[in-house]
Image (cartoon, rainbow, N blue to C red):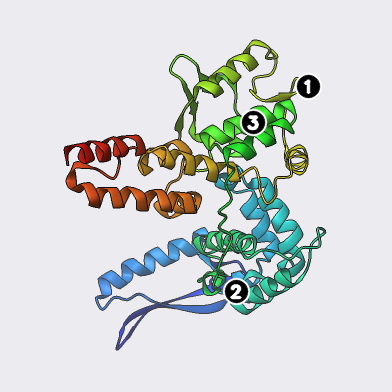
Amino acid sequence: MGLTKRKDGWYVEFSVLDDGRVLTLARGTPGAKLKRWKTGAMNKTVAKEQEAMIKTDLMKGAIKSDHSRDLFTFKELSNFYLSHPTVQKQKTLKWKRVTIEKQFFPHFGIHSIGCITASMIESFRAKRLKDKGYQKTTLKPATMNRQLALLKHMFSLAVREGWLDRNPVSLVKLQRENNARDRILDPEEFAKLQQHSAPHIQAMNVCAYQTGMRLGEILHLTWERVDFKTGFIQLRAEDTKTDEARIIPLTPELTGLLKNLYKVRYLQEHHVFLVKGRSVSSIQTAFNAACRRANIQNFRFHDFRHTAVTNMRRAGIDHLTIMRITGHKTMEVFKRYNSFHHEDLRDAASRFNTYLTLGHSATLTDSPKSLINKVCARSSIG
């Protein structure tokens, strides 16, 4: 025991006890084994400093056993993860808990985390994609990818805590997602939907149609976030999916609607959109029923977001301003919500053709009416 000089440097040895979790200093103790460390130093003085540091760590129980990873089961990792302060604050905590308990436990629960491999995770994914849930529908690749992202986050925490050397989920390739939608609601369809919607759904429809707010943001909207004086809905970071504050301008129609709701609000209830004086947790059943009555097919409430973005773009609002209003953080995500239909492309071609015809006296941002006036003016000059 002590320092030993070899060709590649100085080594230090201590007699230790290994309880499977940590190593502790144990000179002359039955069951103790000799453990050697390479100091990485060629100088004896530096090696002695390393020796003192290792001895201190052994006395504190700060050096983990080589076998510690085999003692942590996936269930123990799950409990540690769900109780972690950063996870506890997340809005997705409930979803994470349900996913871990219902999906992960049956497949990984009894295994030690050190034994879980990329092949086991791929086997889990294959089974999940093959099985059908209670709705008799197969799992979509996007949903599976979200579950794998959760699993990866859990193992990342294990790596950070020193329980694992490598995250096995990082070796698993995510599936290609093809869940982009291009469904928007034209004004005629929106009017028809409003005719067949319950009053509380009508108000939410207008809010989503004219602002592009997410359903969760609408359901949890409170009166303190509505500023009639400035004409904005002012969402705070805790109100949004992206954890970033956002300012949303009110249209005249939405302003009038909200003022009417404010007049008949319940003083004990701070939420804006209510049903029988109570806040609403879900509108899926009522919204789907309204779509059926209006004979509107393949439209989800979230598609109002597509619709709002497309209408703002058609109104001539620049992309960056739209992204500030709707809360899209990247251009890539924004593009998925910006739908182009044949009419948009024909209008673009018409504008470009007029630009080529008139030369630089026209701009591609001119309105159709101004372009017509320029064409007429050019004809009269000729």
Q: Which mark is residue 292?
A: none
> Residue 174 at x, y = what percent?
55, 69
Front residue of this view, candidates 338 and 97: 338
C-alpha gap between disc 3 and disc 2: 56 Å
- Amino acid type, mark 3: Met
Residue 145 visible in this rendered orientation of the protein: yes
Labels 1 and 2: the sequence-earlier one: 2
Q: Residues within 10 Å of mark 2 (few under 14, many from 20)?
A: some
C-alpha gap between disc 3 and disc 1: 15 Å
**Residue at x 58% of width, y 15% of height:** 259
Tell which tag, 3 or 1, sits nearer the viewer. 3
Residue 89 visible in this rendered orientation of the protein: no
- Amino acid type, mark 1: Lys
Front residue of this view, candidates 276 and 48: 276
Q: Secondary structure at mark 3?
A: helix
Tell which tag, 3 or 2, sits nearer the viewer. 3
- Amino acid type, mark 2: His
Location of residue 103 by image quarter:
bottom right
Front residue of this view, candidates 1 and 354: 354
**Residue at x 42% of width, y 42% of height:** 313
C-alpha gap between disc 1 and disc 2: 60 Å
Which residue position holds label 1? 276
Which residue position holds label 3? 204
